[in-house]
Amino acid sequence: MARKPKKGYFVRGQFVAEGSELDEQYRRALKGGDAPSKTELKAQSAQLQALGEALLTLRPALREALALPARLEDALAELARITDFEGRRRQSQYVGKLMRQLDEDGIAAIHAALEEQRQGAAQDTLLLHAAEDWRERLAAPDAAASQAALNEWMARFAQTDAQQLRALIRQARKDRAQASAPGQGVRQGRAWRELFQLIRGMLNEERA
């Protein structure tokens, strides 16, 4: 059976199939270039749907500050409850539909909130690494290195309870020296954990 010929037309010797991306480009050009193509509309819809799904990852405080429409909030709550794949797909599409009703300022505010959360998470990660580094230096096996780190810490955080910090360092170094076998990690004793918590708390205060 012969194939049914595609509908279309020729432009400067080139065949343009109806409904193709090239066809949409020509149609936009005839309309002055203002109307988005079907492909562009589909891409925009997918982006808004993904943005709507990303709202589920926002911290409550950031999400509340957006003052989202009640219908969108209800749709997001339902999306969070659904576990069935097909059900989630349909609900996600509905969320995308509601997202298209937001104005540019509303969309911009959502992007800003997500970026604020991303930057906050990155800063939290850096703070954790810094706290781990300080603990490693303060509880260093070498007494001179440990004392040098302590002097540096107290110069930077003079408000620290020096007596408490020294006691935690002594116990953490003791736990470290009593590792059961060479090559094993540092013993996760109580002092080791409390030293980390103290350091992280002071670093967090400094950041705030």
Image (spheres, rainbow, N blue to C red):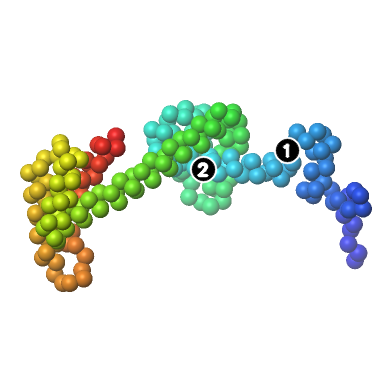
User: Relative to 55, does residue 143 appear above or below in the rendering?
Assistant: below
Q: Disc count in the image?
A: 2
How far is mark 1 from mark 2, CA to CA?
Answer: 24 Å
| Quadrant of the frame with the C terminus | top left
Q: Residue at x 82, y 34 (%)?
A: 31
- Residue at 14% x, 66% y is 179
From the viewer's perspective, tell me whether residue 63 is left or right of residue 156: right
The answer to which of 81 and 120 lies nearer the viewer is 120
In this rendering, would 103 be left or right of 141?
A: right
Marks 1, 2: nearer the viewer: 1
| Residue 55 x, y percent position in the rendering | 48, 39
Query: Can residue 193 be seen here?
Result: no
Q: Name the residue under label 1.
A: 36
The dot on residue 63 is none
Residue sitting at x 7%, y 44%: 163
Pick whichever of labels 1 and 2 is earlier in the sequence.
Answer: 1
Pick whichever, 132 or 91, lies toward us.
132
Q: Where is residue 202 in the image (x, y as percent from the top left)?
A: 21, 40
Residue at left offset 84%, top offset 36%: 30
**Quadrant of the snapshot with the N terminus:** bottom right
Q: In which quarter of the image is residue 91?
A: top right
- Quadrant of the image occupied by residue 178: bottom left
According to the image, label 2 marks what residue?
Answer: 53
| Residue kind at label 2, given as amino acid type | Glu
**Can residue 131 be spotted in the picture?**
yes
Front residue of 20 and 80: 20
- The image shows residue 79 at horizontal and vertical percentages of 50, 42
